[in-house]
């Protein structure tokens, strides 16, 4: 059961405030962590598509993804953990897992529950925190607003959702 309630966190789900595609990230990852997520996607039976540039391909191993030349096409892994909710993983570096969610698909309590369930699933599989920040953040200016806390074993607020 989700602890976060829509009435408390709706500002964090507002595309005008957070951007349509807020950034979600897991710091301190490895090729093995990426492989664990690739395996999770398959084992959960989630719909997915893997692209190199604009070409749809079979999902390679994480080792293959990160052994590609630096000038290779951009890779994306598009995952639908539930119908109509898209998560886009961008395997730029083995050291940090980056992905986007579309807030327009995550409105209301069902959206909060869906996002929390997904963040918990990723965080539990990796045993690491998973944080969400505004789409307008950069790596150096990230201000996480919510995320999976492994010690609490749930998604927690990391910022005050009330705007003054």
Image: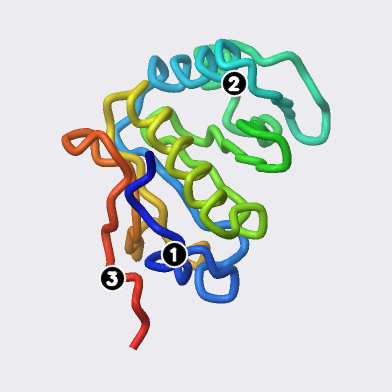
Image-quadrant location for residue 159: bottom left
Question: Can you tell which of label 2 and label 3 is closer to the viewer?
Answer: 3
> Which residue shows up at 51% across the image and 63% down it?
13
- Residue 139 coordinates in the image, percent (x, y): 38, 56
Question: Can you tell which of label 2 and label 1 is closer to the viewer?
Answer: 1
- Residue 2 coordinates in the image, percent (x, y): 38, 44
Residue 160: which disc? 3
Assign a secondary structure to mark 1. Answer: loop
Question: Can you tell which of label 3 and label 1 is closer to the viewer?
Answer: 3
Q: Which residue is mark 2?
A: 68
Assign a secondary structure to mark 2. Answer: loop
Q: CA distance from mark 3 to mark 1?
A: 17 Å
Mark closest to the chain's N terminus, 2 or 3: 2
- Residue 63 coordinates in the image, percent (x, y): 50, 12
Q: Residues within 10 Å of mark 1 (few under 14, many from 20)?
A: some
Q: Is residue 124 visible?
A: yes
Residue 126 shown left or right of residue 38 in the figure:
left
């Amino acid at each position: 059961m989700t602890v976060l309630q829509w009435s408390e966190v709706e500002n964090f789900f507002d595309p005008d405030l957070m951007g349509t595609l807020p950034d979600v990230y897991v710091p301190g990852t490895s090729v093995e962590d990426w492989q664990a997520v690739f395996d999770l996607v398959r084992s959960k039976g989630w719909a997915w598509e893997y692209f190199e540039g604009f070409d749809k391909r079979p999902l390679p191993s994480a080792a293959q993804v990160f052994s590609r030349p630096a000038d290779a096409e951009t890779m994306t892994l598009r995952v639908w953990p539930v119908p109509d909710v898209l998560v886009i993983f961008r395997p730029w570096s083995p050291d940090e897992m980056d992905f986007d969610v579309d807030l327009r698909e995550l409105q209301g309590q069902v959206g909060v529950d869906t996002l929390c369930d997904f963040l918990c699933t990723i965080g539990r599989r990796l045993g690491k925190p998973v944080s969400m920040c505004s789409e307008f953040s950069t790596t150096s200016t990230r201000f996480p607003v919510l995320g999976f806390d492994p010690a609490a074993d749930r998604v927690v607020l990391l910022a005050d959702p009330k705007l003054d």
